[in-house]
Amino acid sequence: MDRELALEFVRVTEAAALATGRLMGRGDKIAADDAAVEAMRKAFDTVYIDGVVVIGEGEMDEAPMLYIGERVGARVAPHVDVAVDPLEGTNLVSKGLPNALSVLAVAPRNCMLHAPDIYMDKIAVGPRAAGCIDLDDSIEDNLSRTAKSLGKKLEDMVAIILDRPRHQQTIDELRRLGARVKLISDGDVSAAIATSFDWTGVDILFGIGGAPEGVLAAAALKCLGGEMQGRLLPENQEEKKRVVEMGLQDTLQLLKMEDLIAGDDVIFTATGITDGDFLQGVRYAGDCATTHSVVMRSMTGTVRFVQATHRLDKKPHFVARTCNAST
């Protein structure tokens, strides 16, 4: 993929963030998600790609926009697969909590795991700890190896994990080992990415979350030089069948980076909607707004942070309509 596409993809996540940010804290996660989806879908129409959504807002009969299998872009080469989450953290936006993002990842056809919307067990670290994790090993072994690679004591380590009853045993074990624990209510894509930036204070991610989010996080970590492993957790025969239909014969296979994101031509971008560990949220001031985004390219390893100022009166209607809505 041409490097010039990177900025085009930033414009797509910016559009979704701008359309959603005004709804922060209003308690309506459905309206926020709808605004993000509509803006992202229409912004994609301006990008010169022939994209197929492999991770999106649901199946064709479940979601009106950005469904799995939908084609996006101007229908010209390059031919790519697209993974999107127009609003990563619907609850975060509706409650005004940190780390809501608009995210997307793009790779050549057949390079992304076509993950169904089921659970995935995950472990992730940043570049300095890549090669030190194994999902099949104990929490203690993974934490100890990661700490050694980072030059830290166990009591200096920060593990991030979704605050869910299913994780209580893992949380108890981390506390027993003396590690510090950061519990989050939602948004494990941002949590996985946070392991790659020292200033976030996050060292390792554990826990079970959505499989589509796992692929998006893996795309970012591939660009950053980090590592993620996962295992799908189908809960019934229907979900097992879905996994096989999407191309994975062994439903319990340990998924490493090349299984999640093959090759070395991935572009990932995210724009902050609410303030977070590594991105600021959208700021509004009259007819202007500012956004803060990150765009990464695995082929070069370049990571760029993009601060943009937007004139809302010059934005397309699908962005400006939400931005200018009165309460």
Image: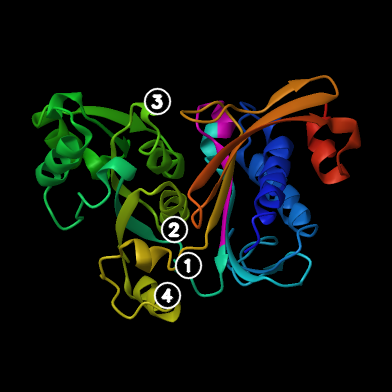
Q: Answer few, some or many: residues within 10 Å of disc 3's Cα (few below 14, many 20 plus, some between 14 and 19).
A: few
Q: Which residue is under mark 2?
A: 215
Q: Which contiguous range is marked in magenta?
A: 93-106
Q: Residue furthest right?
A: 313
Q: Quadrant of residue 136?
A: bottom left
> In the image, what residue occupies the spot 33% across and 81% down?
249
Q: Quadrant of residue 272?
A: top right
Choose the circle earlier in sequence order: 4 or 3: 3
> Does the stretch in magenta take in 98?
yes
Q: Point out which mark residue 112 bears.
A: 1
Choose the circle earlier in sequence order: 1 or 3: 1
Label 3 SS: helix
> From the viewer's perspective, is residue 290 above or below residue 126?
above
Q: Amino acid at mark 1?
A: Met
In three-dimensional space, the C-alpha distance between marks 4 and 3, rounded to whole angstroms, equals 39 Å
* Residue toward you, 149 or 154: 149
Q: Amino acid at mark 3?
A: Trp
Label 4 SS: helix
Q: Which residue is under mark 3?
A: 199
Q: Which residue is under mark 4?
A: 242
> In the image, what residue occupies the spot 31% across and 38% down?
161
Is residue 36 found left or right of 222 in the rendered image?
A: right
* Residue toward you, 211 or 142: 142
| Quadrant housing the N terminus | bottom right
| Quadrant housing the C terminus | top right
Q: Residue furthest top?
A: 285
Residue 290 locus on image (x, y percent)? 72, 27
Label 2 SS: helix
CB under 8 Å between discs 2 and 1: yes
In three-dimensional space, the C-alpha distance between marks 1 and 3, rounded to whole angstroms, equals 29 Å
